[in-house]
Image (tube, grey):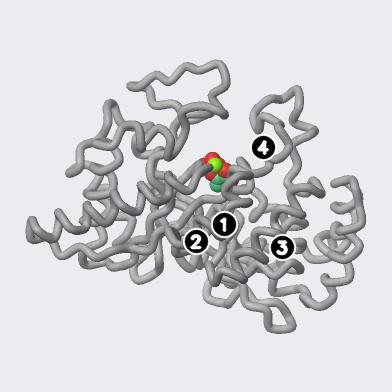
Amino acid sequence: FFQDLEKLKDEPAETLDGFRVRLLTNTGLLADATPGLQRGAEGVGLYRSEIPFMIHESFPTEEEQLRIYKKVLAAYAPRPVSMRTLDIGGDKQLPYFDITEENPYLGWRGIRFTLDNTPLLVTQIRAMLRADIGNENLKLLVPMVSRVDEMAAFRRHVERAVESLQKEGCPVRMPAIGMMVEVPSAMLLLPKLAPYIDFVSIGSNDLTQYLLAVDRNNPRVSALFDHLHPAVLVALEHILQQCDDLHLPVSVCGEMASDPVAVLVMLAMGYRSLSLSAFNIPRIKLLIRSVNRTALLPLLQDARRLSHESDIRALFMPIVDAIL
Ligand code: PEP
Ligand code: MG
């Protein structure tokens, strides 16, 4: 069975009735590049840059970051790589920089932290831009955006970094800039955010956490944490509609893209791009290649009327069981 899965590497992730999905991979480790490519990832949808920061002893310098990013971009070129700027805070801590807060998930996280530490942010952006020279496959991705001014400020920092690097004689180019939609306010402000972004990536882990007010790592409430919660599905349909209206490419990263039932739901909604761990790519590809999207549409209609995630799961589960 697993050997059969490996053979799918060069086959497209396309449903029986011709609906093509792009399968990208989530990574943060250079060691992941080989498995991602072996399993046919069409690029990196989420490079978690905090991972190299976490396994370092202090904030890595621009040159140290440059070396790491260059290897990742080169490994995947010409496939696109979305590099997310540092997303620490919440459950992600650096051994050499303590952030202790009473409500870490509502605190100094992601873009909030980096905009308050601009030398750090600018160093990282410069390293990414320089790593892109000769590869030309870099995209930037911003975590934990909850306000328009954050995206505006981020874009300004990138534009300035491009300008100053070019003045220094570095032939860098302006990359596409994407925004993680993982805070409900970002999802509700897409038309106002659109002028500052080129694409959207949905962080379903945090989006679920913030929509449902359920800590994604607290075992006491883990039964309440489910990305098939009807409110999450309403949110996903809203985001896709908005992105289509605004001509913004949209992809889903987060665990949802590895959950076969959720993948069927998103296929029916019309999502065409998913980013998941390399390990899960073959089985999700097999699933996509084994279904007719049109047969999923009435199930989605039924799912919209349901109020409990377990009923929604039960609706799609027989299809998954028949294939995987
Ligand atoms: C997410 O929140 O869904 C996501 C992909 O980002 P992370 O898990 O790194 O917070
Ligand atoms: Mg997140």
Q: Earlier in the sequence, mark 1 or mark 4?
A: 1
Q: Earlier in the sequence, mark 3 or mark 2?
A: 2
Q: CA distance from mark 1 to mark 2?
A: 6 Å
Residue 219 appears at what percent x and percent y? 72, 25
Q: Are the residues flagged by discs 1 and 2 in contact, CB closer than 8 Å?
A: yes
Frontmost of labels 3 and 4 is 4
- Dot 1 crowding, Cα within 10 Å, few <14, some 14–19, many 20+: many
Q: CA distance from mark 3 to mark 4?
A: 19 Å
Q: CA distance from mark 2 to mark 4?
A: 24 Å
Frontmost of labels 1 and 3 is 1
Q: Is mark 4 within 8 Å of ligand 1?
A: yes
Residue 38 appears at what percent x and percent y? 47, 63
Q: CA distance from mark 3 to mark 2?
A: 22 Å
Question: SS class of the residue under badge 1?
Answer: helix
| Residue ID at (23%, 49%) | 127
Amino acid, disc 4: Gln
